Image: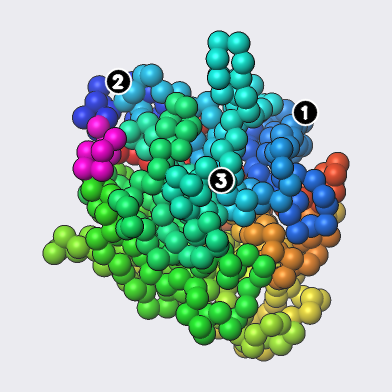
Amino acid sequence: QSELQPAHPLISTATKCKCGPGYPSPREAMKGPREEIIYLPCIYRNTGTEAPDYLATVDIDPNSPQYCQVIHRLPMPYLKDELHHSGWNTCSSCFGDSTKSRTKLMLPCLISSRIYVVDVGSQSRAPKLHKALLTPFSASLQVIEPQEVHAKCNLGNLHTSHCLPSGEVMISSLGDPKGNAKGGFVLLDGETFQVKGTWERPRSAAPMGYDFWYQPRHNVMISTEWAAPNVFKDGFNPAHVKDGLYGSKLHIWDWQRHELIQTLPMKDGLIPLEVRFLHDPDANEGFVGCALSSSIQRFYQNKAATWSVEKVIQVPPKKVTGWMLPEMPGLITDILLSLDDRFLYFSNWLHGDVRQYDVSDPQRPRLTGQIFLGGSIVKGGPVQVLEDQELKCQPDPLVVKGKRVAGGPQMIQLSLDGKRLYVTTSLYSAWDKQFYPDLIREGSVMLQVDVDTERGGLKLNPNFLVDFGKEPLGPALAHEMRYPGGDCTSDIWI
């Protein structure tokens, strides 16, 4: 694909064929089948357990005798990869292409910079590493080594993986091979998974990277910033914030020309992590969660056909003692939108709550649900809250099925129909170890929250618990969640 070729050649055929992967529209996806299994990367780096990270398959069918159990574990071939996020070889962006099928899960590694290709199509309940055919008589495991990513792209520390309408796979980077900040994009062939090079034009990477989302109908992609891997990899140092080493900008890209065309500084926008356009492919707006500033910012295309950003939600910090700083931010670490674009959800990893906002009017989000699922300010812990603009007292610790939950709510995933929200509690192993030492000892959990999709509201399912503290090799840190048929953070409609 040339740099000037439109990256969405299938857009004109998407409405003609009904046999490609995923769903023809977000509304149709909401009618999809109930989730029965879920995939989660589980991390052992920084836990003291000398074992490789692995992909866990969990049974979440309430009618199954294995409900809430890890039914399969796929270990990676190497130690200390730091599996983190995942994506598909193809998704609803290729719905119009009957030659595509969603059979491979991409696992880029945040620290080692490897990319694993996992075959989930052969046996969805027992994934295996994909074997690439070398000759008619031989095959090898599909592992893209960091040396290849470094040599062909001059990138490393990989994060978000999205399938493209072209059939290719694109993965964002946070650094160069030496761990300095660099926000570029690795492009993989969607059939062979060979590294093709960078998506962006030569020497046009953003100064920092993290997440991205594209919207071809507006010829745009937006990417976000965390920090240089050398800055965040061993833990959080508040001095680095004062030194300006953490991100605070959104980067706007021309989707067809693969060029960075605008950079948006954000007020109260420190560490913009997860970015979500509205699912409606005609929409020219969306939201980004700014972790350290604990704000939700709305980005939108303005009347001049450039892009603007405004703060629409602010979670106030809490004045505390017994913590590393005198004020504790919420630390918004994950956000998502329901497929009908009605509700926005996000997690405050430090404060310990998950929130639901009605964003029918995206400029004026309205809080409709809130639930505390652990966190740093629970009663009886080392932190005492001195001043709180929102709560009258500190929340109680969370106990589910006899297990006191360590850590706070972090990654979230919503069922297609919007009625169930799944939550895990690990952010990143080095930060887990720093902020929640008990998470390293106890392991993370997966919880499930019931959602009122009519009036709004969140309620914990007391019968659902997946305890990764009881894993055979020791407590593990479970992270992002994926359903085999796609979900509201993997699939993009064009």
Question: Which residue type carries mark 1?
Answer: Pro
Of the pair 141 and 473, the residue shown nearer to us: 141
Indicate yes or no whether the magenta region holds residue 145.
no
Instruction: Quickly name the residue at label 3.
Output: 147
Disc nearest the viewer among 1 and 3:
3
Residue wearing tag 1:
65
The answer to which quarter of the image holds residue 330 is bottom right
Left or right: 30 as drawn, with respect to 383: left
- Three-letter residue code for mark 2: Cys
- Characterize the magenta stretch by its predominant secondary structure: loop
Question: What span is colored magenta in the figure?
Answer: 1-9
Specify the quadrant that holds the N terminus. Answer: top left
Within-10-Å neighbours for mark 1: few <14, some 14–19, many 20+: few
Question: Which residue carries the number 2 mark?
Answer: 17
- Taking the image as shown, residue 412 lies to the left or right of residue 408, namely left
Q: CA distance from mark 1 to mark 3?
A: 44 Å
Tell me what residue is drawn at x 65 percent, y 42 percent: 40
Query: Which residue is rendered at x = 70% and y = 38% of the image?
Result: 76
